[in-house]
Each structure stands twice: as C-alpha cells, then as structure tokens.
Image: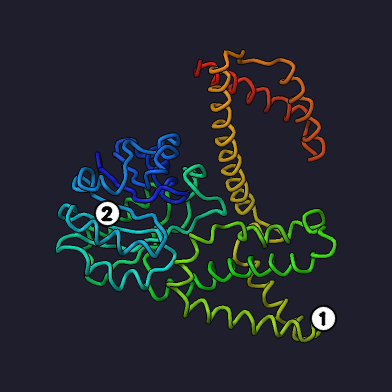
C-alpha cells in the first residue's frame, strides 16, 4: 500500500474524516477529494487532502487511484459508479460508505469493467454534525467498518480494502448485504426515526408553555441528539431500506403498545428487566461496577473526546490568529487571559475539579494558543 493514491468523492463528515485520518496516519498516501464546486473552498480550507477538484476532474485523478471511495448519500452511489467506469485502472477497488447495502450491491459490480472491483463499505461511525467542517481524524478509531464483498471478489481486492480500513484505524468485518440492512434498520435507522418522533411529540406537548428547552433533562437531550441530523442525508437511506425499516418500526410499535397498556404492571416490569439486562451487557460504560480494564476503556474513550474537542479549539485559535493578523492586533491580550483563567477556575470548581489542575491545564492551552497565533503572524 506504499505511495498509494486514493480518491474520495464527497467530502462531508464521513469523506472528510476519511481523508483527514489518512493524511494524519498515512502521509505516504496521496489523497484526492472531489466535491461540488461550491464546496471546494471549504474543502481547501479544511486542509484534508493533497488535491481538490470536482467530478469534472475524474479523468485526471481516477486512473492513478488504487481505491476510490464514494462518500455521498446512498441514492447517488450507483450513478457515480457508472461515471467512474471509463477511468478505473486494472485491479482498482471502488467502495462506498452508505448505511444501506442491498440495493447498491445488486447493481454496482455490473457497472464496472472486468478486473475492477466494487466492495460495499459502511463505517460504523458518525455524528449529528455534517460537512467537511466537522471532519474528525479520530472518527473511525477502533470502530467497526462493515465490508460487503461479492462471492467472487478476489482475495487480494478484499485484503487491500481491509488494509485501507485498518489505516484509519478501524476494525474491518465482512457481512452479507441483506443481513447488514436488517441490522442497520434496527440499530441505526429506527433510532433516528424514534429521535425525530420523540422531538416531534415533545414539541406538540410543549406548545402551550414553550419550556421544553429549559426543562429538558440529559436523558431527553441524549435521545433526541439524532433529531439534529440532516434529512437530505437520510432520505436516500430511508428509501433504500424501506422494508427492513418498516419491519423494525412494527416491532417497536408492538413493544411500545405492550408498555402503554400498563406502564407499571407485570408485563412492563418483565420487559424493563429484560431490556436492562441485555443493555448492561453491551458496553463497559453501562456496567454498574466496571472492572479495571472496563474503567480504562472508558478513560480511552473520554481521552479521545478531549483531544477531538481540543483540535476544534485549535482550529478556532488559528482563525482568530488570522483575524488579528489582518487587523494588525497584538497576539496576547493579558486582561482577557486573566478573565478567562478566573472563569475556567469557576467552571472547574462547579465540576468538582482540583483548582491546580484547571490552572495548569489552561496555562498550557493559553501558552500554546499564543504560539500558534504568533506563527500565523
């Protein structure tokens, strides 16, 4: 895989995060990002790839690419596969990132010339945020990445795609497309619909007093987080997995009906206990008394989030540095830094953090922020 060229078509959250992960972890790769003309300034600003272009540039970048990733909504994938046909080199791999696979896999390989291979893909990672501005190089770290090869996909092609996935670094698994779609209907698509339905019902119930945003608790906010997702991205998913999604909705309605009949009765109790027992098995963060290794896994998870948030802070610092440069303003503002430190200490106190820890942490952050902004000058 050394010196490989990879083209990514569609540089939103997933495509941008793929490019950024490769750029950070595999600098020997050459990464090309293709997107709509009006999105190119944002893609360039994000600095996620070596080359940037549009679909008009297929002829100049695809013939040298060993892997082409289509990171667009699922309803656009097959049309793009067809456009790639004349430009693909021998043994090239084409993949997608869509969360439905059956419909795409039924047609994709038929569109490619002999000796070029389509392998369906779906990284089990995402966010309610969208766009290349939300690109995160840690988005796929240690997350499962589903691959759907055909029965006659050559081993070398599948291994090449697995190597790509491990470069992110994600964990590749192979799965049948139909089984994938059934599982995703319950594990991903139904939660999205429930989140929308819950938010919709809550807004209707809040029409008189309009206090929902002030009184909503953490449980409600967690369960409705997905309601902030872009419908344009989900439209194709819902259309291409209707049967499995409707089956999942039917099962959910049956369970909801069971609970609504007697919310504090015996049936509700048994359903509650069964759900709780299985949910506690699904992740270390849900165990009441985690073992040492479970606690360490939780620390790894939170450390990754800390670094992700810190990276976003640094990007904003860089933008402020550019503004200061344009306005010939000084990099350091001692009064603001003093106010910031006092405010952060107060926040830390409310979160039960040691004052010394907060002070040392933000002293480093402010010092490094000053250095970054000074480099811009």
In this image, 95 relative to 205: left or right?
left
Figure quadrant of residue 288: bottom right
Figure quadrant of residue 177: bottom left
> Residue extending furthest right?
209
Mark 1 is surrounded, within 10 Å at the Cα level, by few (under 14), some (14 to 19) or many (20 or more) other residues, namely few
Considering only vertical position in the picture, is 231 above or below 344?
A: below
| Residue annotated with mark 1 | 264
How many numbered marks have been drawn onto this rendered protein structure? 2
Quadrant where the N terminus sits is top left
In this image, 90 relative to 230: left or right?
left
Residue at position x 55%, y 28% in the image: 319
Mark 2 is surrounded, within 10 Å at the Cα level, by few (under 14), some (14 to 19) or many (20 or more) other residues, namely some
Q: Nearer the viewer, residue 131 or 28?
A: 131
Residue at position x 48%, y 52% in the image: 142
SS for callout 2: helix
Tag of residue 160:
2
């Amino acid at each position: 895989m050394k010196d490989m060229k990879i083209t990514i078509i569609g540089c939103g959250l997933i495509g941008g995060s793929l490019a950024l992960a490769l750029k950070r972890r595999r600098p020997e790769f050459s990464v090309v990002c293709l997107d709509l003309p009006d999105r190119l300034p944002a893609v360039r600003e994000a600095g996620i790839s070596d080359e940037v272009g549009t679909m008009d540039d297929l002829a100049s970048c695809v013939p040298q690419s060993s892997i082409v990733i289509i990171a667009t909504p699922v309803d656009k994938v097959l049309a793009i596969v067809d456009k790639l046909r004349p430009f693909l080199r021998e043994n090239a791999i084409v993949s997608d990132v869509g969360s439905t696979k059956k419909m795409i896999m039924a047609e994709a390989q038929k569109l490619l010339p002999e000796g070029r291979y389509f392998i369906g893909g779906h990284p089990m990672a995402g966010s309610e945020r969208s766009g290349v501005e939300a690109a995160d190089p840690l988005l796929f770290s240690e997350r499962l990445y589903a691959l759907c090869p055909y029965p006659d996909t050559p081993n070398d092609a599948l291994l090449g795609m697995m190597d790509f996935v491990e470069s992110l670094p994600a964990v590749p698994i192979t799965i049948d497309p139909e089984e994938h779609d059934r599982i995703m209907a319950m594990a991903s698509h139904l939660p999205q619909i429930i989140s929308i339905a819950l938010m919709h019902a809550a807004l209707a119930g809040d029409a008189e007093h309009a206090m929902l945003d002030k009184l909503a608790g953490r449980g409600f906010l967690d369960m409705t987080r997905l309601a902030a997702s872009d419908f344009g991205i989900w439209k194709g998913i819902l259309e291409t997995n209707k049967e499995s999604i409707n089956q999942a909705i039917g099962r959910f309605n049956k369970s909801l009906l069971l609970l609504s009949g007697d919310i504090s009765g015996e049936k509700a109790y048994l359903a509650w206990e069964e759900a709780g027992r299985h949910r506690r098995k699904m992740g270390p963060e849900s165990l009441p008394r985690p073992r040492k290794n479970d606690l360490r896994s939780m620390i790894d998870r939170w450390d990754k989030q800390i670094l992700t948030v810190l990276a976003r802070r640094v990007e904003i610092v860089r933008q402020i540095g550019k503004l200061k440069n344009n306005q010939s303003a000084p990099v350091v503002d001692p009064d603001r830094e003093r106010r910031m430190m006092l405010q952060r200490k107060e926040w830390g106190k409310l979160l039960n953090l040691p004052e010394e820890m907060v002070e040392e942490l933000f002293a480093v952050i402010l010092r490094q922020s000053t250095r970054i902004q000074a480099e811009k000058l």
